[in-house]
Amino acid sequence: MDPVESHTDEVVLSAEEYDAVRAAVAGVTRTGPGAQAPSLNSLFAQWNALVDEVEEGCSWCAPDFRHDLMCRDRLAEAWPLLPSRVRAIRQPELDGIDERYRSATIPWPGRPEAGARWWTRRVPRRLAIEASEQRDPDWPLGWEMMPFPRPASVEVVT
């Protein structure tokens, strides 16, 4: 969380809390030389934007989708390192985005969802593709690598 990006107007974090948030996020993100580490707010924004797109219809291939889920991975890794007050303040927001993601996805068949990184054990409910990408009635191009047949609850839309 950056001082200029405070999440709510009523909450003011101490300098120590801001430093702890920056250190937690920097500790779990990988940036190139000279690149600025993302902020906690930017990780939340990435997760929220990804969920927005999944709700509308996922238009990526499976490997790209997994790559985009890394913003949620980073939130999970940073979470226990954050000051408890920051976690308490941001938990309702995280819970809300997570619930939207659960609603926009289905459980991965045959994989237990409970536990760490549950978001990687889910499949978008709606896959948006170009008509030319649909090669067969099952998975569209880029998703055919899935180790199970496309569940009936996964819709492919053009």
Image (cartoon, rainbow, N blue to C red):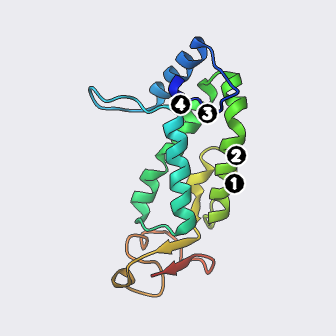
Circle nearer the N terminus (4, 1)? 4
Q: Amino acid at mark 4?
A: Glu
The quadrant where residue 93 appears:
top right
In the rendering, at what x and y percent does residue 44 appear? 55, 41
The C terminus - image quarter: bottom left
| Cα–Cα span, label 1 and label 3 | 20 Å
Residue underneath mark 2: 95
SS of the residue at dot 1? helix
In the rendering, at what x and y percent does residue 66 appear? 46, 55
Q: Is residue 18 above or below residue 151?
A: above
Query: How crowded is the residue under tag 4: few (<14 C-alpha within 10 Å), some, or many (20+)?
Result: few
Q: Is residue 81 above or below residue 149?
A: above
Asked if marks 4 and 3 touch (Cβ < 8 Å), the reply is yes
Q: Amino acid at mark 3?
A: His
In the rendering, at what x and y percent does residue 126 appear? 55, 72
Q: Amino acid at mark 2?
A: Asp
Residue underneath mark 4: 5
Residue underneath mark 3: 7
Circle nearer the N terminus (1, 3)? 3
Left or right of 100? Residue 64 is: left
